Each structure stands twice: as structure tokens, then as C-alpha cells.
Amino acid sequence: MNQSTLVATVVQQVLEKLNGPSGASSSGDSGAGSGGGKSFSVPTGSFGVFSSVDDAVDAATASQKQLVEQGLETRRSIVKILKETAEANAKEWGRVELEETKIGRLDHKVAKLELLGTVPGVEFLETVAHSGDEGVSIDEYAPWGVVGAITPATHSIPTLTANGISMISAGNALIINPHPSAANCAAMAVRTYNQLIAAKHGIENLIGIINPPTLRSAEEIFKHDRIPLLVVTGGPAVARAALKQPKRAIVAGPGNPPVVVDETADLKRASESIIAGAAFDNNLLCIGEKEVFVVDSVFDRMMDAMAAAGAVRLNSAQVDRLTQAAFEWKDDHYAVSKDLVGRSTSELAQAAGTTVDPSVDLLYGETTEDNPFVPEEQMMPFVPFVRVRDIDEAIALAVKYEHGFGHTAIIHSNNLERITRMGKAVNTTIFVVNGPCTAGLGVGGEGYPSYSIATPTGEGITNPLTFTRFRRMGVSGALRMI
Ligand code: NAD
């Protein structure tokens, strides 16, 4: 059977199991989905899907040993399997993920899976050599072993696949604790990947997943003595939990990306960019434009440019209604109400007391800086625009509302001094100039993508090297041939 026929057959078998009348497991217990969508179950106990962390670690440890023994060609081949399978199933898996999580947009769920083909692989591991009078040394990038990964509800299959590509390229196995509301789609993808890897290379459990995942299983992964490295992608609570662990944690934490627009900006380009970025998957991206500061002298023209580019403006009464629906007052602060996270512009418009055509990508409106849409990471296709006196105030507010996450910030300006000044002041991992946020991940810009941007721990846009240990072999006084 050739590789593409095999992919189609395995995927068909997995989907038949998922959609079958009982959804019953053929090989042990089943994890049941806790997401809002259609409930289905994925067999546990084989092909990477486990209900016990210890079992998953045993299986992944054995698979990682096989991976290392089989060499770099096998790693390359496995990365190819992951990329081709994600691309071949992008439409179906995007649909399954959306049905389970009920957040985001189908076209963009599909696009996120198709983008995985550009995630870097084994080619990133370049050996460095030093040669001189004293001999020769080589610096190499070694695996850690089994990596523990936590993945978010916002991009479940894309994050685990991108993590898988990077970590396996680096010679690791991984075990994922997925978000409970996106666990079954993740388990389905993991099972499919492992079946295909096993068919070609005889390695069955290189990507492990815990289903059903719980806070307890996350804690077990954090504490497990055979998991030397953690990679956590998620919001503030899990980022804090990971940073407290007594082992190395690479943390891809929350963002609240501000956008600054000054009077030198190309307002048409700025509007189109803000719509493309903030509307992407209904603003679920951690890099997505979340609040915009526009200098007073071009504020009204910028609001018109947004409308001309296809966004729909809410008036102040509508913004107030939407704000009431989108946030709840908890103790002493506003918190995002999960009900509207990742929902469509139509649903948001309804909450605001109006209607919009389903083809509208983004809603926007004028607010003051104290509207909770500005400080909170809101993940909805509505963007607040705040009028500011000048570029100094714009940069100061951008810094304030980025909250020191060190994640992403954006400027639209044609003044090099101001661009440089904001870049220094905001000090984020990703700083985009005159484009949509996605330009920072190579979409509408240059560079490679990743779904885990390590912010508080500083590794940045993760790639295979992020998941390696540096090793040097030094040969003293020999092996230099010139
Ligand atoms: P979330 O924080 O609710 O969940 C993320 C993961 O952490 C889930 O698997 C969840 O079950 C787990 N979790 C939550 N609290 C935990 C705890 N105390 N201990 C152990 N595990 C815990 O996030 P989400 O809603 O799925 O995703 C959105 C958030 O993730 C946003 O804040 C977004 O900015 C962030 N994010 C960051 C990146 C990045 O690359 N920096 C990428 C995607 C998402």
C-alpha cells in the first residue's frame, strides 16, 4: 500500500470508529469527550492514547528509544507523515475540532492545519564544528527524552502537531495533556499519526496523549520523574502552574497584543491588516490584535477606513450591551465570560442588540481604555479602538495593556524613529510593523511558524532546537586534517 492510500485508510478507520453507532473501544477503556460538541470516544491503551500517565510514559519511553536507534532519516520520514496527514485531513479534522470546541471558524481551523507543512523540521539541527591548533570539537543537539506538553482549546490539533514535528525532529517523544474541551479531536489525531508511524517504522507510541485529561493528569505529568522537560501552551493559570515546577518548563503563555496607529500610517493597509489578524479564527490567536490605539488626528479617518475594508462599527450603546454580555464582574475585576469567546460576529452582534451579515469578519467600536475589552485578553471578533492624544500616549498605553507578557505588539506607521521606539518600549517576543499579526509567524511576512510562542521563559517562537540539549565532543590535539 503506498503512503497516501495508507493515510486515507487509517483516517477512514479512525473516523468510522468515532462516528460509529456505539463509538465503543476495541481495545480497552474509552475516554469520553467533555467538549460542547458531538460526543465521541477514541480507544485508549494503544497507538499513543492512554488514560494513565504512567502507562503513557512507559510506552513513550520505549518509542523514543526506537526513534533514536533508527536515526535521522526516520525522523525526517515521521515529520513528513505528520505534515502530509495534517494537510490531507485539514478539512475533516478542522470540522471535528470545531464541532467539539464550538469556538473559532471552520475556514481558519482548516488553514491552521494546512500551515503545519511550513513548521521547521530536522533541517534545523545543524551540527557546528570548531577546528584549530588544539584539535576539533563538534557541538550537537541531543534529545531530552520524553517531553510533557499541555495544549490549549484554541488550537488543539495544530498545537500538538506542531509540537510533535519540532520535538520528534529533535529526537524526543511527547506526552500531551490536551484541554478537556478539545481532547477527543486531539486523541483522534494522535491515534492516526501513531498508526501511520507504526505502519511505516514500527514505532507505536511516539506521541502520547492522556484521554480523558484532568488537572490531576497534568499535575502527574508535571511531577513525573521520567519527564525531564515541560512545554506548556495556555493561559495565565497553567503558565503560573508550570513556572512553579522544579524542572525545566518552556512556557507559551497568554498575550493581549496592542496595535498602535499613527498619523503617518497607510490607513487602508492598517485596516485590512487589523481585520485579517483579529478576525482570524474569531480572534482566538494569542498573537491576534486585541486593542487598537489611534492618534487623534487620524482617528475618525481610521474608523472610516475600517468600515471601507469591510468591518462593521458598533455604536456606543451597542458596545455597552456587548460589554455587559462579554464580561462578568468577579470579586474585584472583570473576567471574560466564556460564552462569547471564539464566537462569530453574528453572535456578538446579537449580544450587542443588532444583526450583521454572516460574511462580516470583524466588529469594532470606539471605547475608552477602561472598557474591559482593552485590558482583558478577550478572544472575540470585536476590537476596541481607543483615541489617544499622540504617539507618546499610544506607545505608553500599548506597553500598559500588553501587561508585560512579552508576547506580541503591532504598529502601523511609516516613521522609523517611532517604530524603533515602540519596539524597544514594548519589548515583546513578536513585534509586527505594517502588517497583520500573522506576519510575525510567516503568514503575510517572513519566518517560520509555531503554535507555541514561549514568552515568560524566553525561548520565543519554538522550533526543533528549542527541544534539544546542547552537547559538545572535544578532541584534544587530534583529528584536525589541515
Ligand atoms: P487554558 O489556560 O484554559 O488551557 C490551556 C491548558 O492548560 C489546557 O490543557 C488546560 O486544561 C490546562 N490547564 C489550565 N489550568 C491548569 C492548571 N492550573 N494546571 C494544569 N493545567 C491547567 O487556555 P485555552 O483557553 O485553552 O487557550 C487560550 C490561552 O492560551 C490564551 O491565554 C492564549 O493567549 C494562550 N495561548 C498561548 C499561546 C502561545 O504560543 N504563547 C498559544 C496558544 C494559546
Image (spheres, rainbow, N blue to C red):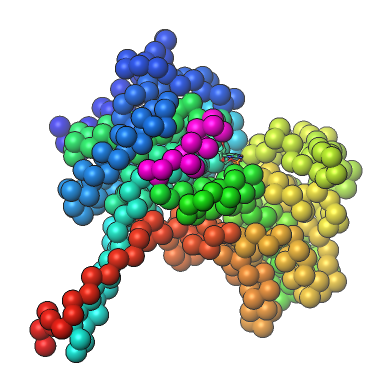
Q: Which residues are magenta?
A: 214-227
In the rendered image, residue 111, in percent from the top left (x then y), is placed at 47, 45
The quarter of the picture where residue 194 lies is: top left
The quarter of the picture where residue 136 lies is: bottom left
In the picture, which quadrant includes the N terminus? top left
Q: Nearer the viewer, residue 324 or 328?
A: 328
Residue at point 39%, 32% (across, down): 54
Q: Nearer the viewer, residue 413 or 185?
A: 185
Q: Main secondary structure of the magenta part?
A: helix
In the rendered image, residue 29, in percent from the top left (x then y), is placed at 40, 17
> Height in image: 163 above or below 456?
above
Q: Nearer the viewer, residue 404 or 350?
A: 404
Side of 386 where 481 appears, left or right: left
Q: Residue furthest right?
A: 317
In the rendered image, residue 274 lying in the magenta stretch gets the answer no
Q: Nearer the viewer, residue 40 or 53?
A: 53
- Location of ligand 1 given as a quarter of the image: top right
Does residue 424 appear in the picture of this structure? yes
Residue at point 74%, 41% (across, down): 336
Does residue 235 appear in the picture of this structure? no
> Height in image: 134 above or below 101?
below
In the picture, which quadrant includes the C terminus? bottom left
Count of all numbered marks drawn on residues in the image: 0
In the rendered image, residue 59, in percent from the top left (x then y), is placed at 30, 34
Residue at point 49%, 20% (across, down): 32
In the rendered image, residue 437, in percent from the top left (x then y), is placed at 58, 59
The quarter of the picture where residue 369 lies is: bottom right
> Height in image: 230 above or below 105?
below
